[in-house]
Amino acid sequence: MLTDQACRNARAADKPQKLFDGGGLFLLVTAKGFKSWRLKYRFGGKEKLLTIGAYPETSLRAARDRRDEARRLLREGTDPGEQRKAVMARRRWGIDEARTFEAIARLWHGQHCPGWKPKHAQDVISSLENEIFPTLGRRDIGEIRGSEILQLLLAIQQRGAIETAHRIRARVSSIYGMAIAVDLVAADPAAKLSQALRPIGKRMFPALLKLDEAQVFLRTMEEQPADPTTKLASRLLALTAARPGMIRFSELREFEGLDTADPIWRVPADKMKLLLDEASQEAFEFTIPLSRQAVDVVRVAAAYAAGRTYLFPSARHPRRPFSENALSTNYRRVPGFGGRHVPHGWRASFSTIMNQRALDQDRPGDRAVIDLMLAHKPAGVESRYNRAAYMGRRRQIAQEWADLLVQGFAPPETLLDGPRR
């Protein structure tokens, strides 16, 4: 066994030296004279090495105490090296001083939010602040039972917010995943709770799926009192089957080649429904081929906007887009169609009607093309960099849809003169 004097007197040599004390503990003296305590042990049939601390900062007595503690962990079936890594991770995140659920949740949020869009990051922390922290926030994260979490989730579900309950369960489970990683808890009490919640029904937007009904709806909507901007936006939305948010925030500079045979709408990545790390990359912009009828709408809307930032500007605030609810409100007022069709429904209308035509005309390949036109994101690496694929066929389908939908409609200029609300 070693003594303090032997440790102090140990000197550097040509090669590193190991001065053994017992029980796998030894003092390593490097060729440059640096001294540190190491513990050799076996776990899971493998030999491992644990660094305990430098000498003389860590005394012989302290090194023996840590050896004894490591051997106790081994008897209990715990790898002392892995536990030390967990302890160091907790210290880096300040978890040793804060074991409450709220403290760990905020540390988890801080780790993840750089990869989220700001709005989503705020939604995540707000949901925890409103639904979880008031009841469980001050509790030790290791003492919370699954039944307590379930009680809060069921209260959310009883409000009719089933999807919210599932989202919050997933967030709580992820927080426990972090706690498990740093050895704060042994299990995730929220892992199986989704089985006790109502399943999330597939979200369906009300939509007219027959061509004649879609035509009547659009024509009737344009005959109702409404601001010209709303009517023009509605027609372009129907013709392109774009997401309503893309129409609302569209700018004239995004529309290219309007005087050519190949006009397009190049939607920037940050306006697409993408993850934050993709939204900043030019490769993820989306290109929409424009029909002749869509080009006509863009030209009329641009003239009516009179050089303002957005193609469909707000009447009260020239530098802002028109109201987020303008289309939805006007759609609900269409006589005979209340609640049967929403702005987002044009995507389902286009998909259903054009897929049925493809089936009737024996064009099975059109299905994948139609999915691309809706900016659906298929799996696979190639698809991530091929968002403008099949442009020729996409343009043909876009023109076919426009010819069908607005056949016999008055030109978009007439929308400027109709009744206003």
Image (spheres, helix red, strand yellow):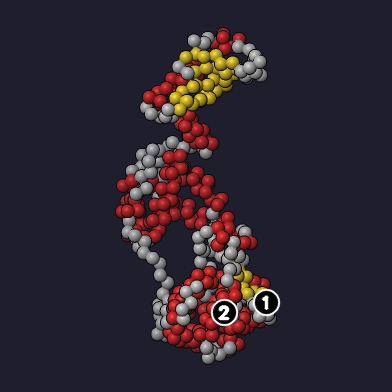
Q: Position of residue 367 (x, y in %)?
A: 48, 72
Residue 282 seen in render: yes
Judged from the image, the secondary structure of the residue bearing numbered disc 2 is helix
The structure residue drawn at horizontal position 40% and vertical position 38%, both measured from the top left corner, is 185
Q: Residue at x 44, y 36 (%)?
A: 183
Q: Amino acid at mark 2?
A: Gln
The mark nearer the N terminus, 1 or 2, is 1
Taking 56 as reference, is 193 above or below it? below
Q: Which mark is residue 375?
A: none
The image quarter containing residue 281 is bottom right
Q: What number is the disc on residue 257?
A: 1
Q: Looking at the image, do the residues carrying marks 1 and 2 touch, with CB atoms under 8 Å apart? A: no
- Please state which of residues 174 and 364 is positioned toward the viewer in this rendering: 364
Q: Is 53 rendered above or below residue 124?
A: above
Callout 1 amino acid:
Gly
Where residue 277 sits: x, y (%)?
58, 55
Name above or below for residue 158 compared with residue 319: above
Q: Position of residue 16 (x, y in %)?
A: 61, 18
Q: Residues within 10 Å of mark 1 (few under 14, many from 20)?
A: few
Task: Give the residue at x 32% y 53%.
Answer: 195
In the picture of the structure, the residue carrying the numbered disc 2 is 396
Image x and y of residue 327, in percent: 50, 76
Tell me the element at label 1.
Answer: loop
Q: Which is closer to the viewer, label 1 or label 2?
A: 2
In front: 204, or 228? 204
Mark 1 and mark 2: span between their CA atoms?
Answer: 16 Å
Left or right: residue 418 versus residue 129 is right
